[in-house]
Amino acid sequence: MHRRDPEKAGRAGGRDRSRARDRRAAEPAAARGAGRGDAAAARHADLGARADARLRPLLHWLLTLDLADTDLLTRLSARLGVDAAAYLRNVRPYLSASQIRKLGRDGFVIGAHSCNHRLLQRLSRDEAEREIVESCRIVRDLTGQRTAPFAFPYSGAGLDRTWLAELRRSNDFIGLVFDTDGLREDESFVVQRVFGERIGYDRSLDAILRRAWAKRNAWRRGA
């Protein structure tokens, strides 16, 4: 019988605990106000299991750019030879208006996701309101839907639900609001959800759901 070396086992256990701490550090904090949106953005910066971890801060920065960083991004792109306009023209990663209308005719409900994909927690109330209201208005006008559901960029953590409810009362074309905090219960108009498409190392659908149910928020009633 092979005997396990306790010293090696201890070192392996230490590495496992360190990796676990690293994974926990990348997850959003339980309650940090506006900072929870930043943490959620970091969590969504999914580089895959084998990617160079040094890329994560860069991707996080790219995902959470403020308008004040636009000039810096332009200069970096020029230095690295990145032609964003050519990429959009050649790859066309977004649906056209005609494609969106066709999806609507085929029975799909089209939702809004803000105008500029900015962390709403960092914006003034007026700016955040515009991101929500105008994006839903555009989708409504484009598709002819009576209402347009809205999904927060990154996360709606820390956003005042009373304020959101008033936005919906004042703009009756804003439909249900979708967030990213797993299975926890929220206000009746806020639907929390789990990322089920992230399949890979330790990311089977079974593992994803088990982790979601294991979080304390999944068992807590109320927002």
Image (cartoon, rainbow, N blue to C red):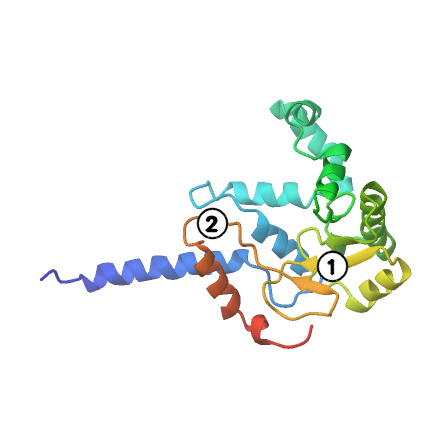
Q: Seen from this angle, which residue lies furthest left?
A: 1
Q: Would you call the spot at circle 2 few (<14 residues within 10 Å), some (14-19), or many (20 or more)?
A: some
- Seen in the image, is 123 located left or right of residue 31? right
Q: Is residue 122 visible to the viewer in this orientation of the structure?
A: no
**At label 2, which amino acid type do we have?**
Ile
- Judging by the rendered image, the residue that carries numbered circle 1 is 177
Residue 208's spot in the image, x, y percent? 48, 59
Q: Seen from this angle, which residue lies furthest bottom?
A: 221
- Judging by the rendered image, the residue that carries numbered circle 2 is 199
Q: Is residue 38 above or below residue 182?
A: above
Residue 42's spot in the image, x, y percent? 59, 51
Foreground of the two, 27 or 21: 27
Residue 12's spot in the image, x, y percent? 29, 58
> Gap between marks 2 and 1, in whole Å?
25 Å
- Seen in the image, is 198 located left or right of residue 153? left
Element assignment for label 1: strand
**Residue at x 57% of width, y 59% of height:** 194
Element assignment for label 2: loop
> Which quadrant: the C terminus?
bottom right
**Residue at x 77% of width, y 47% of height:** 114
**At label 1, which amino acid type do we have?**
Val
Q: Please tell me which of labels 2 and 1 falls first in the chain.
A: 1
Q: Is residue 47 above or below residue 186?
A: above
